[in-house]
Amino acid sequence: MPHQADRDANRALRARFDDVRSRYERLRSGMDEMQQRLARMAVTVESPDALVRATVGPRGQLVDLKLDREIYRRGDPDELARTILRTVEEAVARTTDQVQEMLSEYLPPDSGAAGFLRDGDFGQLLSRQDQIMREADENDGR
């Protein structure tokens, strides 16, 4: 019976390894395409009153801002500033969603990198490694 359990455990480990390797190979082979898609990415959002258009790049950087001439007739600079900020924030949020969606094609959803992209929590980047280290410490009797 112990030999059967060992074989089953080995099969499960092998299947997990094959899955991880397959994901890595897919990520690696798609890296160039993903970089090209990211380089071309630009998200444009228009304010509800159609007077402000903001375009941001893949890192959320503002790459273009268009103001309709009508905006100068309004005369409230504070309202203009708020409209610009809300429009840029919406463009950044949509860009973030698109980048996450694109990367989810290559990253496992439970990976630290996917968690970081989703939550912005740097702790997510090393969460799996932290877990491995804790398990290693427990196995060493620490």
Image (cartoon, grey):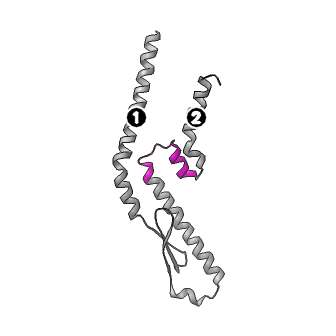
Up-down: is 110 above or below 47? above
Read off the residue under disc 2: 131
User: Quadrant of the image for the C terminus?
Assistant: top right
Up-down: is 49 above or below 73? above
Residue 24, given in percent of the width and then of the height, sits at 39, 41
Q: Residue 47 appears in which quarter of the rendering?
A: bottom right
Up-down: is 101 above or below 78? above
Residue in view at x 35 percent, y 41 percent: 25
Which one is in front in this view, the residue at disc 2 or the one at disc 1?
2
Circle 1 residues within 10 Å: few <14, some 14–19, many ≥20: few
Identify the mark nearer the N-term, 2 or 1. 1
Residue 99, given in percent of the width and then of the height, sits at 46, 57
Residue in view at x 37 percent, y 38 percent: 22
Q: Give the range drawn in magenta.
A: 102-119
Read off the residue under disc 1: 19
Q: Which of 53 and 128 is in front in this view?
A: 128
Q: Residue furthest bottom?
A: 73
Residue in view at x 58 percent, y 37 percent: 130
* 94 relative to 137 in the view: left or right: left
Amino acid under disc 2: Gln
Amino acid under disc 1: Asp
Contact, mark 2 vs mark 1 (Cβ under 8 Å) = no
Q: How far apart are marks 2 and 1 (CA)?
A: 20 Å
Give the main secondary structure, helix, strand or loop, of the magenta stretch. helix
